[in-house]
Image (cartoon, rainbow, N blue to C red):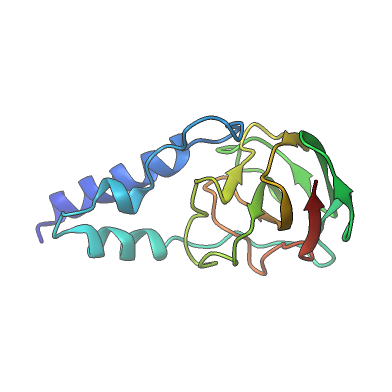
Amino acid sequence: MPLKRQLFIFTTMTSLLLAGACGQSETEAPEPSPSAALAGNESAPAAVAAVAALPRTASPDGAKVFFITPVNGDTVSNPFNIEFGIKAMSIVAAGDNQAHSGHHHLLVDSELPDLALPIPSDTSHIHFGDASTSTQLTLDSGEHTLRLLLGDHRHIPHDPPVISELITITVK
C-alpha cells in the first residue's frame, strides 16, 4: 500500500480515537469505532496494525483506580450513582497529555479489551474523556459486573494497565 494511503488511514484512525464519544452519557449513541469505520476497506488491517503500534504511556508504581460507590455486592435501584476513585495519578480530559494522568472508562458486563489498542466506545465501554469522576447509570434488573480501566490521552491503557477490581452489583 502506498505510504500516502497508510498515512491517511493512520491519521483517520487517530482522529476517530481522539474525537470519539468521550464524556458521553450512557443514553447517547456512541461514535463508530475506528474498525467499524474501516469495515470493508482492504487497508483496514494495516490501519489497525498502525494503531496497535502506538506507544503505551507508562503508569507510576502504586497507580490504582477503584469504585467509591457502589461496592462489591451492593443492591441498587435505577438510576444509581457511581463514583470513581484514583490513587497515584491525576484525572485529565482526553487529549491532555500530562505525565501520570488519564481518564476513566467504565466497563459494564464486559471482559477487558485488548490492552494494546484504544479502548472501544460502546454501551459496554463507557468513556469519561471529559475527566468526570462520577456518573448516574441505569441498567436492566439483575446482576451486573463493573470495572474501571484508565486510558491515556489517546484512550490506550497505560503500561502497566491501571484496572480496578471487578465488582458485581444487583439492580432491582
Q: x%, y% of residue 86?
A: 83, 50
Q: x%, y% of residue 127?
A: 60, 42
Residue at coordinates 60% horizontally, 35% vertically from top-left? 26
Residue at coordinates 37% horizontally, 39% vertically from top-left? 15
For this rendering, which residue is in front, 60 or 29? 29
For this rendering, which residue is in front, 139 or 56? 139
Query: Which quarter shows the N terminus?
Result: bottom left
Q: x%, y% of residue 137?
A: 71, 37
Is 83 on the left or on the right of 144, as rendered?
right
Residue at coordinates 68% horizontally, 43% vertically from top-left? 139
Residue 77: quarter of image: top right
Q: Is residue 44 above or below residue 106?
A: below
Q: Is residue 158 above or below residue 34?
A: below
Residue 2: quarter of image: bottom left
Residue at coordinates 69% horizontally, 49% vertically from top-left? 99
For this rendering, which residue is in front, 102 or 68? 68
Q: Residue furthest left?
A: 2
For this rendering, which residue is in front, 16 or 6? 16
How many numbered discs? 0
- Residue 70 visible? The answer is no
Q: Is residue 116 above or below residue 14?
A: below
Q: x%, y% of residue 14?
A: 38, 45
- Residue 120 visible? The answer is yes
